[in-house]
Amino acid sequence: MEDVLANYYSLVNKVDDLCRQIETEFSDQLACHSGCSSCCRHITLAWVEAMALATALQKLPPNEVEAIRLRAQYAKPNGPCPLLVDDRCAMYDYRPIICRTHGLPILREEAGKGLIDYCPSNFQGVETLPGNAVIDLDRLNTLLDSINRVFINEFFASKPEQERLTIAEALLLEIDTTGDTT
């Protein structure tokens, strides 16, 4: 499984490097901290991210896996992320890309216009942001989509019916090393 996820892991490393650079350079402008979970919602993931999360779950001790899967079974669609335990992510090192960039300034396009969005607790009183503080979300999503398409072609015999899975659905996946999921 790890080999078909290699492209995804490479992207995660690049995203982590970029986020670390922003967090280091603008640390005095960031209010995000361990224990702040206001942005930790139950979101959907691309298949490659869902499978990476499900694969990482298998690396945890059985009692943790059981507790996480139990929370996933009862997760509400618009509720908090099922990985939250005492306002901290139970799988922080394996969190999806959106969770890695959340709160940081992202550039997105809406109605043909570039908009910069970030956690309202961050960059308070700042009128403009330098380009090196902003993550191009459209570019990142294009890369993730390409990696996801390659993953689907390599992993599945035919395109899955669902395009995206919730975090809970990802956590409840049973991974068969032959390539089938249930």
Image (cartoon, helix red, strand yellow):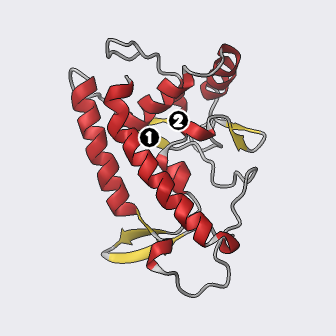
Residue 33 is left or right of residue 103, and the answer is right
- Which quadrant of the structure image shows residue 66? top right
Position above or below: 5 against 40? above
Q: Position of residue 53 (x, y in %)?
A: 50, 31
Secondary structure beneath label 2: helix
Measured in 3D between alpha carbons, the distance from the residue under mark 1 to the one under mark 2, in whole angstroms, is: 7 Å
Q: Three-letter amino acid code at disc 2?
A: Ile
User: What residue is rendered at 36% in x and 32% in y?
Assistant: 5
Q: Seen in the image, is 86 located left or right of residue 126?
A: right
Query: Which mark is on residue 167?
Result: 2
At a point 41% along the width and 39% down the height, the residue shown is: 9
Q: Earlier in the sequence, mark 1 or mark 2?
A: 1
Question: Residue 10 vs residue 90: left or right?
Answer: left
Q: Position of residue 105 (x, y in %)?
A: 52, 69
Q: Residue at x 33, y 39 (%)?
A: 7
Report the side of 43 relative to 149 (left or right). Answer: right
Q: Circle 2: is it few (<14), some (14-19), or many (20+) Cα within 10 Å?
A: many
Q: Nearer the viewer, residue 114 or 7?
A: 7
Residue that carries the numbered disc 1 in the rendered image: 45
Q: Is residue 128 above or below residue 163?
A: below
Residue 182 percent across, percent down from the top left:
41, 15
Q: Quadrant of the N terminus?
A: top left
53 over 99 or under it: above or below = above
The residue depicted at 43 percent of the width and 75 percent of the height is 115
Mark 1 vs 2: CB contact within 8 A: yes
Kind of residue sitting beneath label 1: Leu
- Secondary structure of the residue carrying numbered label 1: strand
- Look at the picture and state if 139 lies above or below 68: below
Q: How many marks?
A: 2
